[in-house]
Amino acid sequence: MTTSLRIALVQLSQRIGDLAGNAERMLEWRAKAAAQGAELVLVPELQLTGYPPEDLVLKPEFVRQTMETAERLVDATVDGGPALLFGSIHSEGGANYNCVILAEGGRIVGRRLKHELPNYGTFDEKRVFTSGPLPEPILFRGVKLGVPICEDIWAERVCSHLAKQGAEILLSPNGSPYEVDKDSLRQRQVRERVIETGLPLVYLNRVGGQDELVFDGSSFVTNDDGSIAVQLPDFEEAMELTDWVRTPNGWRCESGQRAALSPYPEDMYRAMMLALRDYVGANGFPGVILGLSGGIDSALSAAVAVDALGADKVWCVMLPSKYTSDESLEDAEACARLLGVRHDVIPIVAGVGALDEMLAKAFDGSQAGLAEENIQSRLRMVTLMALSNRFGHMLLTTGNKSEMSVGYATLYGDMAGGYSVLKDAYKTTCFALSRWRNSVQPEGAFGPAGPVMPQRVIDKPPTAELRPNQKDEDSLPSYELLDRILEALVEKEMSVKEAAAATNADIAIVADIERKLLRAEYKRRQAPPGVKLGTRNFGRDRRYPITNAFHTS
């Protein structure tokens, strides 16, 4: 009877569609695990294809090549090294399945299909996969291993079935994206499964950025008494060799690494860093360019970019108009100096004048106002995109979630670009992140250990500076109130009446914010991708019709 097992838990990044590269990296990590005496190597969900593969699964050639590469991975285990439990796609009878394959000695020891397919929030697996039957345990060296895949552990059914079928250890590969407070939610769900089944459970998650999602790793092992025996770090690749012993009461994982997970707001900031780093790197950009206005949003975006990519890959451009204050010019220059980035000043006054002259006849007799303000924003975009086109840097947009919610942003102006790290961060969150980053250098950051922006940038009233003496709160409630209202309307989907009661706000103000929120949907559809940070980001989580007559006010 087997009395001990050494299982290597490897939380890895993935590159979607890079079948050969993902397979090669699995074998590299398997070799490292073999050198440390591992008998079994576990990697995250769909490690071969990358997660989420989305509609690539609907492409028959992609599925065919995935299965061919999986066969080669199985063949590679003929070397006598540790068994490899990896995620792939299995196609049979015209249906595609999200699966795991246990390979050892050049053969498939077991293949299991994901039963519970998530179809909410960021997930739409029912669109591309077919649900597999309730899985049976896989016999490995005399031990019955239950392998619930990701969503399979978020409800009782699969794990309970595996326990009834004699599973002794539960190994769960995951592709679970980061969102704030997700660590405690995962640990609570796993503890529930452990209590229900009486079995220890390994939760192994992928790491790295994928478009609007970022995966934080944070893998862990929970023993049958509910205690956490092993905790891997967040936001970085890692491998942990776990030692398992058979006791009179079943299998138990010996205590191992107990990495400290990042608290708020560090976790959110590191998520932004990792998402941007992987997006820029995977898509082959030499760096990023952004407009540095002297305001908090562009200062924070620049700080994240420097921390993620390094100062040599970040180019900041100040684009003053006749309304730009000396204070903004000074603050932008000071931000650039603190971050050590290239800083250019390109005034747009001449361009605004040329457009005023060009449009004079067409505008004759009409009232000056929003059109003239937006011309400034769009000229800034034209200038930044010209630099991007010439030198290859991706344009990083700097708008936050509060602005995106109510449409306080210019379409084809400050909304234009390739990626946004603040897209899912409310304005008050931007203040919190800026204060924190000015006193703390996050793990893995390339930026300075000291402040990244002058304190004045954080303290001064926000303004777009598109007209004389303009302040954001001329058009909006205070951001403290606005963000509370938006959290009620967006994250919690409350009605106007419910949101007014929950935030102690005037119902007329809440109704106006709801109207702005719904009216701005067409703008958000044309916004660049940005990293998901909360529970209801725009695009992947919250999907509203553009043409919509329903209001709760």
Image (spheres, helix red, strand yellow):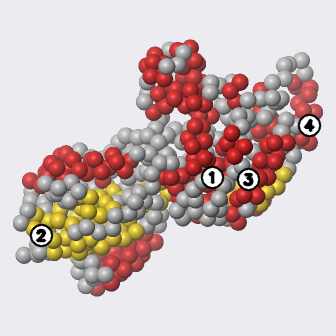
Asked if disc 1 and disc 2 are in contact, CB closer than 8 Å, the reply is no
Nearest to N terminus: mark 2 or mark 4: 2
Q: CA distance from mark 2 to mark 3?
A: 58 Å
Residue in view at x 42 percent, y 74 percent: 25
Question: Which mark is drawn over residue 246?
Answer: 2
Tell me the residue that label 3 is attached to: 335
The x and y percentages for residue 401 are 58, 38
Amino acid residing under circle 3: Cys
Q: Nearer the viewer, residue 130 or 229?
A: 229
Question: Which of pointers 4 and 1 lies earlier in the amino acid sequence?
Answer: 4
In the rendered image, which residue does mark 4 sit on? 353
Give the class, few, some or many, for how many residues have Cα within 10 Å of label 2's Cα (few <14, many ≥20). some
Q: Earlier in the sequence, mark 3 or mark 4?
A: 3
- How far apart in space, not on screen, are marks 3 and 4 (Cα)? 29 Å
Residue 72 percent coordinates (x, y): 34, 76
Where residue 473 sits, quadrant-wise, is top right
Q: Residue at x 64, y 41 (%)?
A: 399
